[in-house]
Image: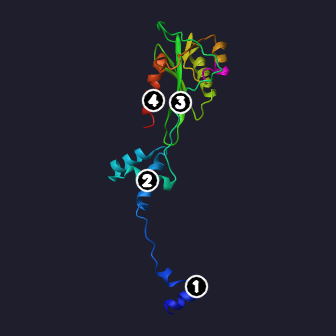
Amino acid sequence: MSIRRCCDLLSLSRNGLYYKPVKDKDSDLCNLILDIWLERNNKGWRSIQADLWEYHEIWVNHKKLRRLMKKLGIRGILPKKNTSKSNPTHYKYPYVLKNMEMYRANLAWCSDISYVKPPQGHVYLVAIVDIYSRMILDYEISNTLDAEFCIRCLERSIKKYGPPVVFNTDQGIQYTSTAWIERLRLNKIIISMDGKGRWADNIWIERILRTISTNVFI
């Protein structure tokens, strides 16, 4: 049978029979970009651009890369760094560690919250540190910023080491919450809080969490 006859029987156009679709010249690059993003889907265009150059020796202009990422429907995930939002209705306690001599363990503890980036997404980390020994007494990871995971960490620390004399935190909503304050008062712990914007008042825990958040999941 001739090709014309076959096309007539199948209701096909001969033009369509001979048509060869043109391959998208960026399809291979799109697949590579998607593979890189799927390895750790919080990568933005800067990280993907660096990976393309370092590991594949492919240089892509940032405008083209952002256009291709938009076409693929992917983008970097940027967790909010502000983990210390304050509630204006909660009472803020004064800072009592100034000029206080740290001469023994279990005299003063401090705590703070940071975020860390596992292979996918991000999680929040709370840690409790003994100021005298710089030892991490306990920690807990959560995917939310409610006060409950902080309270669980506090209760485990007290159960293992007994209550400290003073407990210092920032003015975050978790540490000024009624549930947190009640736990401290129940254990007759003196409450201390950093001054507003005074991150250096809690420098012991700030340094430890900075080290953890920048090195654990790299």
Residue displayed at 45% across by 29% down:
212
Q: Is residue 37 magenta?
A: no
Disc nearer the start of the sequence (2/4): 2
Depicted 77 relative to depicted 215: above or below? below
Which picture quadrant has residue 192?
top right
Where does residue 95 sit, x and y in percent of width and height? 54, 12
Between the residue at mark 4 and the residue at mark 3, the CA separation in whole angstroms equals 17 Å
Q: Which residue lies under the disc numbered 2?
A: 33
Which residue is the extreme one toward the bottom? 1
Query: Is residue 179 highlighted in magenta?
Result: yes
Q: Residue furthest front?
A: 63
Disc 3 secondary structure class: loop
Asked whether the viewer can see residue 34, the reply is: no
Quarter location, residue 193: top right
Q: Are marks 4 and 1 in contact (CB under 8 Å)?
A: no
**Span colored in magenta:** 174-180
Q: Nearer the viewer, residue 51 or 149?
A: 51
Q: Residue at x 61, y 28 (%)?
A: 149
> Closer to the N terminus: mark 4 or mark 3?
3
Q: Type of residue at label 2?
A: Ile
Residue 82 numbered tag: 3
Q: Disc 1 versus disc 3: distance between alpha carbons? A: 64 Å
Cα distance between the residues tagged 2 and 1: 41 Å
Q: Closer to the N terminus: mark 4 or mark 1? A: 1
Whether residue 93 can be seen here? yes
